[in-house]
Structures are given as structure tokens and as C-alpha cells.
Amino acid sequence: MAKPLIAIVGRPNVGKSMLFNRIAGKRLSIVEDTPGVTRDRLYASSDWSGREFSIVDTGGIEPTADSEILLFMREQALLAIEMADVILFVTDIETGVTAADQEIASMLLRSKKPVVLAVNKMDSIGPTNPDIYEFYALGLGDPVALSAVHGHGTGDVLDACLKYFPEETGEEEEENVVKVAVIGKPNVGKSSLINYILGENRVIVSDVAGTTRDAVDTPFENEQGRYIFIDTAGIRRRSRVDDRIEKYSVLRSEMAIERADVCLIMIDARDGVTEQDTKVAGLAHEAGKASIIVVNKWDLIEKDSNTMDHMRQEVRNALGYMTYAPVLFISAKSGQRVDRLFELINYVDNQSAMRITTGMLNNVLSDATARVQPPTDKGKRLKIYYMTQISVRPPTFVCFCNDATLFHFSYQRYLENQIRGVFGLEGTPVRLFVRERGRDGE
């Protein structure tokens, strides 16, 4: 069964993200004393009293918001409320009950969802601050004293939420989920792609570059499988990352790549492959992730019969280290070819997890060395004794030989190509290590 979901809501800068990080046990949500830092919904899993659950952090709700971004944030919070089993409404003892708190309380009462009211920033130990009683005026029951900074009251808050969790059915949740990170420079259509797939405005879409700041996890299921899409902040060149929030966002994107099974590397068809695109793709390649190069906004390109072939060749030339990655041309706006993504995601994920027996590998090795003799140097020839696979994601192989200094990079590349030629391994990097027999205990 699906895990119960707690949605953390409240006006900006009351400590929602601090509480989210406290419950998650990780620094997943950006915490900064700047209102509006958390713009999208951000998910994490946790457990309490033996019960697993999910939590979602939302942008601060501004009931009278008039700017585009603030309206989007309010819409995201409302979607989180709609999906949640329990609403955790966070307020601030330092400001007392504000007009915005009263508006949000009215909104939550209309939702008919269970609400736990937490009064944050009660950091002092000792007698309860009597100002907490003011929050009864919100009509949401007993307020729970909380200090998200120090952790005081977190257990009381979770105990209160636990009472509203649905009964456990005992069904085991399947683990067969593919985690897909959608990466690219700012404003290439990452959020638009996820919104098209989900059929809802799940992630903020705006022409303002840098709108998505956190890496946002979104579960999705269709007839082809179960997925978690991770929409990442656009990765800017580090030299242009000036403010602290942007630095956190770039780091979060890199962490999302590490968590992913498959990376969708999005490129804007109008721009072609830019220097920044090569850096983004390089992150996925260096992390050893199965990857698909997704050329977006293809509907905006004037075409003839050769346009797609020319663009594919441009991608291959610019990303010469990723010739293994399939290239797909889509329009996230119209949905053109988006349905093909799932077939490719499953395919490259399976390729990345492929295991090859030592016997089959050494048959390939024997044929390859017979076809092209190993290199020699000063009369000494490289001897390769055997090859074995040591891990997957990416497929990683070790060759044992007589002298590692003779194992030229070009011959390693030749063997890698021979392995790919026999077993495929499309969409995934391949790593090949060389060891001299007798070293490292071998």
C-alpha cells in the first residue's frame, strides 16, 4: 500500500523546511531566511513508532499573492493538501496569529482534511509560553509546541499526525521503481516534460530561468512500470553561481544524479548542444548513470528530410564520450514522442543492470585478442589472463594481465567496443579496470 502522506504547509518563513529536514533526517530542503525559497513540493520518506510515511514540504502559502511565482507556489501547496492524508500546519510563536494564518486555517477547514497545528520557534526550555493559547483562535484544535531548530516537540507533532494515518493493510509495496533524474541547463523544459507526463501542473513552469530550485521527487505509474521522476534545478556553470541559494540548487541537482537510475539529459533544439550541455551530460557520464539525450522543443524547429539526422550528428560530435546514449527528439509542450520515453527508460535501465558471466566474457576476450593482438613495448607483449564483471550500474569489468603499463587506453577502448558489440549495453557507460595478477591479493 502507499505510504501515508503528511503535507507541511504554512505561510513563508515559519520554519517549514527546517521541520521537513528534521523529520527526514537529512538536509533535503533548502533552508534560508528568505521568504519563498521553497517553491515546489519536495518529498521524502521517514518513519515514526514503526510506521513508515512520506512528507512533502511546500512553498509558503500567500493567500493574497499577486505575482506569478507566488500564485504558482500557492497552487503547489493546494495540490499537496489535496494529496495528503494529514496536514501539518506550521505557525510562528514570534509573530503570533497573523491574518495570513487565519486565511490558511479557513482554507484547511474547507478541505475537510485532518489538521495538526504546530506552533514553531518555541525554543526555550521551561514553562510553556502562554502566547501559544492565542492559536486556539484558529479553530484547529490543540496547538503543539515545537522547536524545529532544536527538535523539541517533533515527536509530539508526529504522534499527533500518526493518529490520522489510514489503517495498515499488510500489503508489501513493490521495490521495482526506476528513479529518473531530469537534468539540463535552466529553462530547457524539464518541468514542462514532467507536467505533461503527469497531466497536472506538478512542477512550476515559468519563463523565468531558475524557477525550480529544489530537486523534486514525483512518483508515477503506467502500464510500462513504476517510476520516480526527479525534476532538478537547472545546472548553471559554477562560475556563474553567485548566491548561496543557487549553490545549494546546483549541489541538489548533482545529488539527484547520484540517486537516479536513469538520467534524461535535456537539450534545447533551438540552441543545439552548448558548452553547458556538455558539462551537464558529463556529470551523468562521470557518475556512471544510464542516460538518454532528450532534444526538446523539436516542434519549434523548421525541418526538412535531413534535419533530424543533422541534429543527431551534432549531438554525437559534441558529446563524443556518450555515443552509447540514445537520442530522442520530443516536444514537452505538445507531447510529441514523449510516450517513447518510457520504453527507452526501461531499456537503458535494464542494460545498465546487465550481468554477464565470466565464461561469456572470456569467449569475447579470446576472439578480440585473436583478431587484434595486444600491444607490445620493447619486446614485451601484454598478456590478458582473464576478464570478469565485478558490478552493475554501470557494468564494470576487471581485466587481469601481466603488466598494466602495456595496457594502452586505445586497447581498453577496443575491448569495450567488442563487449558492446556482443552484449549491447546501449544507454549505459561501461567501466573497465586493469589489474596485474598477483597485486591486491589477487
Image (cartoon, rainbow, N blue to C red):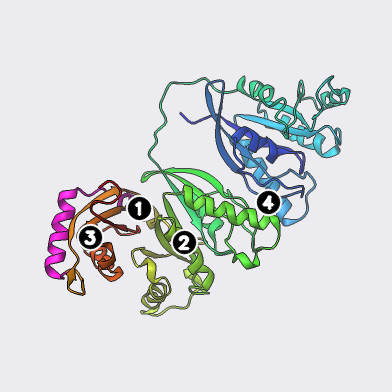
Q: CA distance from mark 3 to mark 4?
A: 49 Å
In the image, which disc is placed on residue 72?
Answer: 4
SS label for mark 4: helix
Measured Cα–Cα span from mark 1 to mark 3: 14 Å
The residue identified by callout 1 is 394
- Using a 10 Å C-alpha cutoff, classify the residue at mark 1 as few (fewer than 14 neighbours), some (14 to 19) or many (20 or more): many
Q: Give the foreground label among 3 and 4.
A: 3
The residue positioned 78% from the left and 34% from the top of the image is 91
Q: Which residue is mark 3?
A: 419
**Residues tagged 2 and 4 counted as in contact (Cβ below 8 A):** no
Q: Is residue 361 above or below residue 372?
A: above
The kind of residue on which mark 1 rests is Pro
Please state if 94 lies on the left or on the right of 356 as rendered: right
Query: For mark 2, what is the residue?
Result: 265
* Alpha carbon distance from label 1 to label 4: 38 Å
**For the residue carrying disc 3, how many other residues have a C-alpha within 10 Å: few (<14), some (14-19), or many (20+)?**
some
Residue 240 as seen in the image, left or right of residue 33: left
Q: Which residues are magenta?
A: 348-373
Relative image position of residue 46 (x, y in whole percent): 55, 31
